[in-house]
Image (cartoon, rainbow, N blue to C red):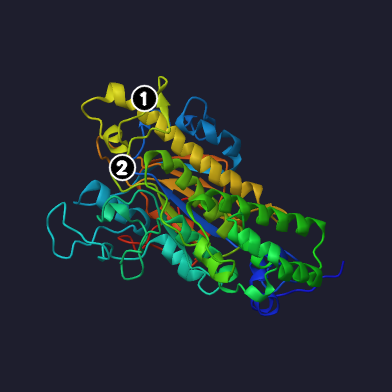
Amino acid sequence: MKTKPYNRRDLFKSFGASALLLHPILSSREGYAENAVKKRFFTMMTSSGVVQSNFWPKGNSASYDFTGTTLEVLSPFKSDLSLVKGLRNDYGPFDSHSGGAVSLLTGNWLNTDGCNKASCDFHAGDTFAKSASIDQMIAKYYSGKTAVSSLVLGLFPTSERPSKYISYDEAGKVVPLATNPYTVFNAIFKDIIQSCDSSKLDPAALAKIKSKRKSILDAINADLADAVKQVGLNAEEKAKLAFYQDSIRQIEATIDSAASSTAASCNGLKAFTTGPQIAVKAENYAAIAKLMMDLIVAAFQLDITRSATLVWSVGGGNGVPSTWETFNGQPIVESYHALTHHQADPVNFDPKLKILDEWHASQFAYLIGQLKASKEGSSTLLDNSLALWTSEIGEGSSHTSLNMPFVLAGKAGGAMKTGRYLQLPQTEHHGALVSILNAMGLATVKGIGRFPLAAPILLT
């Protein structure tokens, strides 16, 4: 079949909101104006480190095994991973959680603006950092190529201290966390929502909207069908389109029940996508986390953004019982904070914390599994991405900055080697941050934060 190359601008001019689904499919065609590898970067930050004795693989760099460790659930992705032990997140003379969270992706110490105390009374919007975080540097590098520069998401934002934030702009100012899944959904699919034209909605689509069993896809079904005919999708491309549509419907099915729509119109459709935040309860935590990850994957699939972060709790942990997991058949009722700061009772708390470490690992496995299942030409979305799981410190009880968890998945389009376990002498993590930036396309970056020169230790 003869196919015509389109660039993103032409697609949106010709097909409107339907281009949101067509662009990532057509961009893999030979001759397409933007068919270079599109790299994405994701960071998952879980707070207060890990149980060090259980976390790392057994063996050495030449031969290692995940069996019986926190990372066992990642075994199917062994060839996609770069594990780095021995990195240190030096948080300076500050509170470990606040200082560590600020330094995590900036490589810079906390900006206290004259406050000499180890712990200060910070307020939302303050300039906590002294420089940009790598996710925002990547977002700026790809500025103009995507509809949304970055997704900065969070769960359980229980305070306004610096330990809540890991993303900072060039001025060192906080990039606020989006914690309402509706807000994120609207940001990703705004082109469809805002382009809705009631005159083009048939009665069946309107009925779906009014009855709450509806989809934003109903707003563009007719236009999308026409666009598909015009661009001439082959069987593989049609399958990919169906995959994207199914992904969107699954996300909608998760959030539908919390909203209602009162008008069979585009206003009704827009109202459906704006609802109250899902209640922040322990029983909802896992569901909200999965929804946020699904939204990130959808945004990556559709090339709506190339940078995303997800903060799982404020540094130091949250005060919510982890009742979605059990120990000896009973729900874990202690808060994550209490478990990670277990100096007084490690015998009883460590086994429970290991379970939660393993649950976090399973969540990371879920996300990278979704990325790997999404095809991009002869590669996968995971092949073209870098996904990082890390923490602001190495271990919660001691608050050490040593051996911070640092698990990378993906090849960044071939720039990052995988299938390896690096065991380094205690090393500042700046070189790892520079490695990520270089792999993501920022080839001229030679240093970051407190280190204007930092060798890209993961690319050697």
Instruction: Report the disc number at residue 277.
Output: none
Q: Nearer the viewer, residue 55 or 435?
A: 55
Q: Earlier in the sequence, mark 1 or mark 2?
A: 2
Q: In this rendering, is residue 321 above or below 307?
A: above
Label 2 near label 1: C-beta < 8 Å? no
What is the secondary structure assignment of the residue under circle 2? loop
Q: Position of residue 274 (x, y in %)?
A: 47, 62
Mark 2 Cα shell of 10 Å, populated few (<14), some (14-19), many (≥20)? many
Q: In this rendering, is residue 9 above or below 407?
A: below
- Residue 180 appears in which quarter of the rendering? bottom left
Is 322 positioned to the left or the right of 251 in the image? left
Task: Single out the residue that lies furthest toward the right.
Answer: 1
Task: Single out the residue that lies furthest toward the top.
Answer: 328
Instruction: Report the disc number at residue 351.
Output: 1
Q: Nearer the viewer, residue 18 or 44?
A: 18
Q: CA distance from mark 1 to mark 2?
A: 17 Å
Picture residue at 42% right of the left edge, 20% below the top: 329
Kind of residue at badge 2: Gly
Kind of residue at badge 1: Pro
Instruction: Report the disc number at residue 317.
Output: 2
Q: Position of residue 258 (x, y in %)?
A: 48, 52
Q: Nearer the viewer, residue 296 or 258?
A: 258
Q: Position of residue 390 (x, y in %)?
A: 41, 46
Q: Which part of the image, by quadrant, shows the N terminus?
A: bottom right
Residue 18 in view, yes or no: yes
What is the secondary structure assignment of the residue under circle 1? helix
Picture residue at 52% right of the left edge, 26% below the top: 67
Picture residue at 45% right of the left edge, 47% below the top: 288
Residue 386 in view, yes or no: no
- Residue 39 appears in which quarter of the rendering? bottom right
